[in-house]
Image (tube, rainbow, N blue to C red):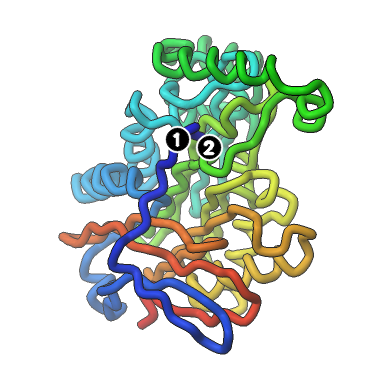
Amino acid sequence: MSAMPRRRFLQSAAVTFAGGAIYQRAQGAPLLPLAELRAQGAVVVSTWPFGQPANEKALKVLQAGGAGLDAIEQGINVTESDAGNPSVGLGGIPNADGVVQLDACIMSGPGHRAGSVGALSGFPHPISVARRIMETTRHVMLVGDGAAKFATEQGFARGPELTAGQRDGWEKWRREQAARPAPAKAATGGAAAKPDNHDTIAMVLLAPDGHLYGGCSTSGWGYKLAGRVGDSPILGSGLYVDDDIGAAGATGIGENVMRYCGSFLVVEYMRQGLHPQEACLETIRRIAKKDPKGFDLSINFVALDKKGRFGAAGTGSGFEYSVTCGKFSRVLQSPGLTSSKVGPIGGNRK
């Protein structure tokens, strides 16, 4: 959700050819035995390098005896609080009307509970509002003015509507839009897409008690049409948790994830016995096979199974994701998928 390039790819990534397909693999990717993973007590996986401090906060919450939902909420709160992050929280790029509208969801493996919020304006921590919806109402999802009314009634503190930097960027974008030909504006509803303005934090974790949890938070597609809701708060699209199997989350262009229930599909592939990374890759293959754009989709997934194995994959050159367990906390490069023949690699495969 930024108008500027934000995706740093590891310089150490090795490009490998397998069966005519191309993928990337991070040098030194961890291959931890499952016994060692269990000894670590918890595994936290999230999207992008900005997920690393969120992971570390989540792990500290667990190590202090906090619950899995507390870890997800407080971990994602770290990213939401970063005003310099143009992808998540109130520092995010606004919609076409100059308003930051936030999406989030949270899901608990135990009880298969979930809460979700869409197009929420003026509140810095949509993940916390989503959790409150889950725990205090009969509903799963609230959106727009109704979500804001609920957050106000629940006593959540409001934040700035728009940072000064994002206001300047929006005003520049608006001037550029005004100069575009009318047919071009009509084709996109006035909100032109950019390839690097749709990042998200999706976090999944395996708690010391063996239960799975997940959360997702974003400011959405930069300069989107007012009221647009992406995949992030949609269960089964931006996030899905099955306490018997595993959890998965997504980042990228939400429309290309939600039309295929991407995260749910990743978990279903794990149910069939695939390693989390293989499940991410197979999900992308399946989507690309059906979608007219093929692999030109800008979609990425992270996944974690009940055994503590993890993985990630994305289209193109892949993306960076963060893994934290015990004293181990690193940003890794996922494989990128540019051909249906690419094979599964990397991740924690033991």
160 relative position to 74: left or right: right
Image height of 162 relative to 304, above or below: above
Asked if residue 67 shows in the view, the reply is no
User: In x, y percent, where is residue 86?
Assistant: 43, 30
CA gap, disc 1 and disc 2: 8 Å
In which quadrant of the rendered view does residue 116 lie? top right
Callout in the foreground (1, 2): 1
Q: Which residue is drawn at 63% across and 46% down?
A: 235
Name the secondary structure under disc 1: loop
Q: Residues within 10 Å of mark 1 (few under 14, many from 20)?
A: few
Image height of 70 relative to 45, above or below: above
Q: Residues within 10 Å of mark 2 (few under 14, many from 20)?
A: many
Residue on which the image places disc 1: 4
Q: Which residue is drawn at 65% across and 76% down?
A: 340
Q: Which residue is drawn at 31% across and 78% down?
A: 34
Q: Residue at x 49, y 63 (%)?
A: 317
306 relative position to 329: left or right: right
Q: Nearer the viewer, residue 244 or 310?
A: 310
Asked if residue 88 shows in the view, the reply is yes
Instruction: Return the residue found at the far left.
Output: 327
The C terminus, quarter of image: bottom left
Residue on which the image places disc 2: 197
User: In x, y percent, where is residue 214?
Assistant: 46, 49
Give the residue type that dot 2 points to: Asn
